[in-house]
Image: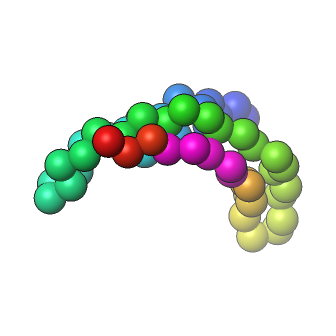
Amino acid sequence: MRFDIASESKRILEAPTPNFPFERTLSELQVPWVTVTPEAVVVALSFRLRVQ
């Protein structure tokens, strides 16, 4: 199984939303670790989101 975390994170975080008139730009994304438990896939994300 392969999932493109970077492009999905960018799409979600930069998507326009109603009642939020500011532009958002994802400028940095890191995935320090990923682990699998019996219940879930746990992903740690570190990101910088520019809002203007």
Which region of the structure is painted magenta?
Answer: 45-49
Q: Along the horizontal axis of the image, is 28 left or right of 1?
A: left
Main secondary structure found in the magenta portion = strand
Q: Along the horizontal axis of the image, is 1 left or right of 48?
A: right
**Image point 68% across, 51% down: which residue?**
45
Inspect this view and state whether residue 46 appears: yes
Q: Considering only vertical position in the picture, is 1 above or below 43? A: above
Please state, as top left, top right, bottom left or bottom right, where the N terminus lies in the image.
Answer: top right
**Image point 83% across, 57% down: which residue?**
36
* Front-most of residues 36 and 48: 48
- Residue 32 image offset from top left, x and y in percent: 82, 46
Inspect this view and state whether residue 12 appears: no
Q: Considering only vertical position in the picture, is 2 above or below 50? A: above
Q: Quadrant location of residue 14?
A: top left
Residue 19 among magenta residues: no
**Image point 25% across, 46% down: which residue?**
22
**Image point 49% across, 36% down: which residue?**
26
Q: Quadrant location of residue 50?
A: top left
Q: Considering only vertical position in the picture, is 2 above or below 37? A: above
